[in-house]
Image (cartoon, grey):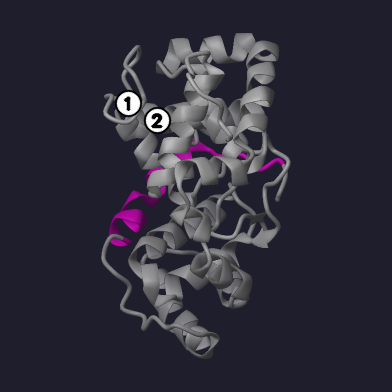
Amino acid sequence: MTRGWQYRIAAVTAFVSLLGAAHTASAAQCGNSAAGFDDWKQEFAQEARARGVSASTISALMATNYATATIRADRGQKSFRLSLDQFLAKRGGSTIVARGRSLKQSNAALFASLEQRYGVPPGPLIAIWGMETAFGRQRGNQHTLSAVATLAYDCRRSEFFTDQLYATLSLIDQGALSSNARGSMHGEIGQTQFMPKSILNYGNGGNLDNTADALEATANFLKGHGWRAGAGYQPGEPNFRAIQAWNAASVYQQALALLGQQIDGGGRRSAER
């Protein structure tokens, strides 16, 4: 993971048209193996150049490698098919709750400030932090640009990751992200694993390797997805929609809601069985 990179909000406006254009699926031909990746990069580079991406950032894109480990991880997300209890056991739910309660106490002023500003209580923020990186200990070591470029090329979710790739190129052009930044398998970055497009939209100009900045950005993300202060966040309650926006997997959403509730002191059962 790269260290000390700063996100400058003022620079984002210069890239609005670039990101808007990314909503149109790339004309470059997607593929399902490494065989066509170099040809795809050539085609994509032409499109990116036409949308204003700088020559130095295009060069960084052209230097990327097909991320075999990312494709393997993307195809092998079997834990999302587990039951909630099985998923919590696999992810160490009770450990997250115990550690989370301790961190809630030791960082009480920070969490009080975030709740006052964004309306989000500590539990969901701490649950996300614990689930995503084991409270910052597991942030990944995958080359971010290679990972996102590979997934943009891969036919399975090409349109979604084309948006993420343009966001990554934008961050690099701004100097907000190193072209050699390292993170998790799908391009996630920082303490709570923000995707590049979310960094642009919700990063608040902070350093997402820093705990306070990452938690603030996470609270901003949830508020940006409709979080209402004081409303519940369990399935069927108003704020569960914001939790659903964080991760598409149903079991992950349920786990975050349950762990958050238990960290906030409202849980009725153990996080593991």
- Could you say which disc has been placed on residue 12 in the image? none
Residue 234 sits in quarter: top left
Please tell me which residue lies in front, 233 or 209: 233
> Is 166 placed left or right of 236 in the picture?
right
Q: Main secondary structure of the magenta part?
A: helix
**Label 1 CA crowd tier, 10 Å (few <14, some 14–19, many 20+):** many
Secondary structure beneath dot 2 equals helix
> Is 237 placed left or right of 86 in the picture?
left
Q: Is residue 199 magenta?
A: no
Q: Name the residue: 58% across, 39% down.
A: 131
Please tell me which residue lies in front, 269 or 197: 269
Which image quarter holds the C terminus?
top right
> Is 271 placed left or right of 228 in the picture?
right
Please tell me which residue lies in front, 140 or 172: 140
Tag 2 residue = 222
Residue 32 locus on image (x, y percent) = 45, 83
Vertical arrangement, residue 55 with respect to residue 229, above or below: below
Labels 2 & 1 near each other (Cβ < 8 A): yes
Q: Which amino acid type is marked by label 1?
A: Asn
Residue 5 locus on image (x, y percent) = 65, 43
Residue 137 sits in quarter: top right
Residue 157 locus on image (x, y percent) = 37, 67
Residue segment shown in magenta: 4-22
What distance separates the C-alpha of mark 2 from that of mark 1? 9 Å
Residue 221 sits in quarter: top left
Secondary structure beneath dot 1 equals loop
Please indicate, yes or no, whether residue 206 appears anywhere in the rendered image: no
Q: Name the residue: 38% across, 59% down.
A: 163
Q: Is residue 13 magenta?
A: yes
Q: How many marks?
A: 2
Q: Which amino acid type is marked by label 2?
A: Leu
Tag 1 residue = 239
